[in-house]
Amino acid sequence: MRNYIKLFSIFLFTGLLFTACETTELGLLVSPNDLAADQADPNLLLISMQLAYATNQQTLGDQADNLTRIGYFGNRDYFAGLPGNTLNGVWSRTYSSGGNGAGDPVSVGILTNLQALEDIDANLETDYSFHVGVGKVLYAHSLFQLVDFLGTAAFTQAGNAVEFPAPSLDSGADVYAAALGLLSEAEALLAADPPSQGATDLFYNEDSSKWVKLINTLRLRTYFLTGNSSAFNSVVAGDNFISSNADDFQLQYGTSSLQPDNRHPDYIGGYTPSGNNAEYRSNWLMNNMLQNDDPRRFYYFYRQQDATPGADADPDEETLVCSFVVPPPHYDGFVYCAVPEGYWGRSHGNDEGGPPDNFLSTAPGVYPAGGKFDDQAFGVVGLGVGGGGAGIEPIMLASYVDFWRGAMATTDAAKAGFLGAGLEKSIAKVQSFGSLDSNADLSTEPDDATVTAYIDGIVAAFNAATGDDKENVFAEQFWATLYGGATESYNYYRKTGFPTTLAPNWEPDPGAFPRSYLLPQNEVINNPNLTQRSDLSTQVFWDTNPAGPAFPPSN
């Protein structure tokens, strides 16, 4: 409840701030970051950083899950579906290189605020090293992610507009090294457990020890991607990373639908008086979880119908056009249009228009969106039902760490152990959300015996498989675990090529799978040192796999 109140208050502050900016002559305002160190409020600077960072996590998570079939990508052509403006907001919220458009109150982002906090800490007697340490963690992770999505980022010349008004970009490897350095600086500050000085910490309630665990977890994901097994094992040996659900790094949403609205974004779109207006759920993921009898599906997805046209109900041209269509040859063996048992979503690349299916299609569930638990009552969604939107934005979870450790394991037995451990943590976390839906019949929840049988069955399937089949079992379960916060799926897919079982795009030739995104168009337009790319083929420095379209195999 504490996080709900804090989050509501902060969104209220930023909402009022943005409203004021809309109705005031901006030329007469003084930026908080232009104030002297003894005038700016470091707590508000930290709030602004956290909001910018949180919005970026939502954006990047959605981008990643859409590409990797955990979510839904609605374009037959990758290049057309990922234009140059896709990451404009992420870039500006990281560097404060400009406004982020109407509706986004964060016009000053992470780096600018970090520099202001460092100045305050250096020039005032009050110790604000907690603020600076947290800011360095957020900035470091943001730099890692810019490299992961763009292959490059600004660091050396960033944040110095007087000397470098048009900053050049650094190599991905150099930015990674710089971000690791920032993590070390942050650790030195936070390991001393500095006073929080009234700061509002949206993630860890001002617990410095948990921020240090996050720092080591970010190192683990970095060493996994770069293949640095000795550094990875050294962090593991230190035993001070996110290894318990209690230490998970996530953003907590609230239930207020007033302005500002602090509910989970998927709930806002999926639970309206006009039904489910959220993005379609992924047919590939729903079918995979249905075929595996994954107990998490009742928490991830809320079915408004018990049957799907073209699967276990008559085709319906009005509500599901493709239910009349014969699947094309390249979709042989994959669910093309309809998943049975009312799992009503869309397949990768389906660009059909929006039919009247708001009270028919599968809605976001109680995890992580704070929606309804699927107790198989097959009711309809609506405003305020279920958990009211009090979900989370998963960012770095203990279950993710188990899958990284499994991927780095040197024996199949060790990998199987981490697979089982990751599933145990994931399912326990997901099931804890069932109680958010006070009107659900929780007697239908999968019981302990069902969960144990599922985990044992997956581990047995992994042990019995060989070659690519073994890797697919592992990766498919990682995909299901990443639902709701799937940024790392994009990295894992380009790093390993698994799972190879992903459904193809609706279009037989959608272009090679995007190995990185176009540079943010706003920055390209305003920075004469940059030239926009002509395709999505640029590989991140840690992606040493063959060029597309041969890799990844599923595309």
Image (tube, rainbow, N blue to C red):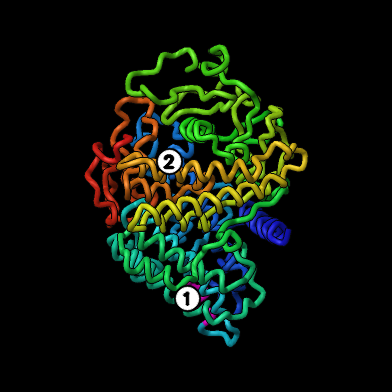
Instruction: Identify whether 196 is placed above or below 50.
Output: below
Q: Which residues are magenta?
A: 114-121
> Which type of secondary structure does the marked residue at label 1 adopt?
helix
Under tag 2, what secondary structure?
A: helix
What is the x, y in percent for residue 329? 33, 19
Which residue in the structure is indicated by mark 1?
187
Q: Which residue is pictured at 66% across the width and 35% down the height?
A: 374
At 71% from the left and 29% from the top, the residue drawn is: 377
Left or right of 93 on screen, residue 23: right
Q: Residue at x 41, y 29 (%)?
A: 349
Q: Which of the 4 image quarters holds residue 276? A: top right
Relative to 550, residue 102 above or below:
below
Q: In the rendering, which numbered label is found on residue 461?
A: 2
List x then y, in percent, for residue 274: 68, 28
Q: Can you tell which quarter of the image residue 474 is in?
A: top left
Q: Quadrant of the N terminus?
A: bottom right
| Magenta-colored segment: predominant secondary structure | helix
Query: Looking at this view, is 92 or 321 the one in front?
Result: 321
x, y percentage for residue 75? Answer: 41, 31
Query: Residue 484 or 179: which is nearer the viewer?
Result: 484
- In the depicted view, which residue is nearer to us: 354 or 111? 354
Q: Is residue 116 magenta?
A: yes
